[in-house]
Image (cartoon, rainbow, N blue to C red):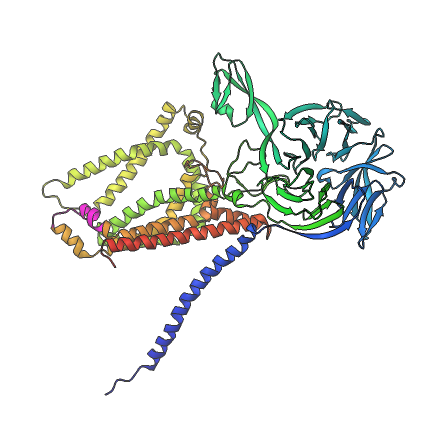
Amino acid sequence: MAHQPNLKAIVLDRIAAKVIPGAGLLVVCCVLGILVFLAYVAIPLFLPARASVAVVRGDKAACLAMDFVEGTAEPWWVTGEGVWRLENGSPVKVEIPGYAKARPVAAANAGISRTTGIVFDDGRFALVRVEKRVDGAVAALALDEQTFSAVRPDSICAARDGEGHGKLARLAGGIVTVCGPAGLGDAVETPLEISDAIAITLSNDAKTLAVARNSGEVEIWNVEDLTETRRTQTLPAASSRITALAFLLGDETLVTADDRGAVLGWMRVRHVTLTNSGSTEAQVLGDRVPAGKSVVVRDQDHSKHVTKDGPVRVTPGGLLFLKARTFPALHAAATSVAASPRNKCFAAGDASGGVAVYHGTTEQRNIAIEPPVPLPAKRVAFGGTGSELGAWHDGLRTWTIQNPYPDVTARALFAPLWYESYPEPELVWQSSSGTQESEPKYSLWPLIFGTLKGTLYALLFSIPVAFAAAIYVSRFAPASLRSWVKPAIELMAGIPSVVVGMVAALWLAPLAERALCGIFVGGTLFPFVFAGIVALGGRLTEKPGARPVPGLELAGALVTLLATVALATALSGPVERGLFHGDFRQWLFEKLHIHYDLRNGFMVGVALGFAVIPVVFTIAEDALANVPASMTTASLALGATRWQTVRHVILPAAASGLFAASVLGLGRAAGETMIVVMAAGNTPILDPAPWNGMRTMSAAMAIEIPEAPVGGSLYRVLFLTGLLLFGFTAALNTVAEIVGTRLRRKYGRN
């Protein structure tokens, strides 16, 4: 009888032949889709900023100051004839209530207060804001009015203090006079002891005045109280004259630009005074202090490196400006500098008409606008949103700038930057802060380091335990023990990671803190107890006629563990009282400067290692069990012991599987989130010590992505972090496959 084809089997085979490859292709497409999406979100961080012309209006009048109408992109400016704005492309005068007959003689933007200080020909000074009212009409408002001597200054600078009062510094004939309210009294005028000033600027809080002198020096004055003004610092003289300067948002950085186009950033840095009362020269952190002298240096925790009874004494030296940043130069002499009210950006104009936008933290020139006309950019100003930029050449010109991520560059992500209030360049992750003036810090190295640190400690805990368990279960354990030990370990993989993290953070971490001395004693005693148990077990099995006892190895391990715990518990109290003055943790801090964090790398290693053990054990045990029995029996027949067989035959034959288990465990540990969120302390620091915490890449994404503004710098940096983590795990899998293939070829396994 002829064979009849099974139509059902044929149909199923054909369906399987289509579905299975299609499903595999779908998985590959999904993985590539995730990769493409991560890259799509992250790539805009590195796209160049752009500027597009918005308004061009010719005007031969001399512009005293310019700004933008509050809440809009409409510019307004001040000339000797009054205040003007554009309406339907034509200039329209804006009346200031109470100043209809007064004429401006000088004006300057008052920092980030969105007001402009104007001095009128009758001696009055006012902070003026031009804003759009609810009904859509544009009106000018004088927020603060004061009266001073009717002096026609060469230039002025203005600021609004915390109480809403205006403060004015005017420059006339090289002499600087500071004007404003003094305490609860009337406005006063205080001349400074300067006769050759050429440029001035006030800080946004109206407390600090910077004066550029014709000699090239820049003097810093404290003008918070106009009855007690004092010079606090003189910046070193430059080889050229400073022609423009401004304080950035937050007043921690002073930008100076000179007549050669050089642009520098001077930052407030905390200093200390080192006083040497000894008879010989002393040196602290590389700073030399002559005998009997005092020197002022940057504060780099010098107090931690001097002894209490030594000849060197450390006293606070206050905040002093220090040259910290060098920006790309302008094409010609600087004519004006204006700070952004939203971030650390600033704009600088030069004598050739060019305008450049810089970021004060990254030292990058984000936008360079070529000179529209060969005339100096005498005035520059940012709009209230930071996305409008204006300049005055032969008239008004404004641009709409697209610079959404000025604080993110390759250097900011992967190289040390000198941040405000820091003594030196550092790698810092601090994505959020309490004030708008603070600098976002997006260095990824603390996250990468934290990921590697947590992974390393997890593998140091999990791989020895998992490999030892796999070797024992596959080659030494009796069948009855193997039948329940292997499933029990594999079931550990089903425990939710959030449960493991919660147990580690709320139970294990406080327990380890209380038993810190006991852990130290137990770790010291364990090798000796283990050696004693092994020696005792060897004597018992070496007796004539003795037969191997199944499970004896496991019993020995349990006895070793219990004996170590018992001895550590009994001895920890006496040891702590006798050697460590009754407090082991305090002794570590005082003697070794070790601060033990409650949630640290050790906790992460234990908790994360517990989660990794099932993955490593399962693959390692399968690799060891699949070594051909012929190789094992041949080794035993030649007289090798079981341990010799494992070491010289089984482990080399299963090397590819063991390596794959290690790499998969590495990937599992690197991508874990909940355990490190709960047990790591989430401190993004570069410290390999196990008693300190860390923050991993996955933890940063889990914690910060819910609050990151969609499309903002932090949002895209977190997606970039995910892309890097994705690439890291993909590279691990690739290396595992390559090495595993070579090991299989080496030991003849296909």
Task: Decide whether residue 639 is among the magenta residues.
Answer: yes
Measuring from the top left, give residue 513's x and y in whole percent. Answer: 43, 35
Task: Decide whether residue 424 is among the magenta residues.
Answer: no
The main secondary structure of the magenta stretch is helix
Residue under the image location 25 percent in, 37 percent down? 530
Measuring from the top left, give residue 599's x and y in whole percent. Answer: 45, 39
Given the current orientation, which residue lies at the most extreme bottom position?
A: 1
Q: Closest to the observer: 588 or 736?
A: 736
Decide if residue 625 is in sight here: yes
Measuring from the top left, give residue 332's x and y in whole percent. Answer: 66, 39
Part of the protein shown in magenta: 638-650
Q: Closest to the observer: 293 or 393?
A: 393
Specify whether 696 is left or right of 156.
left
Image quadrant of residue 128? Answer: top right
Image quadrant of residue 62? Answer: top right
Given the current orientation, which residue lies at the most extreme top position?
A: 279
Residue under the image location 58 percent in, 50 percent down? 48
Given the current orientation, which residue lies at the most extreme front position?
A: 374
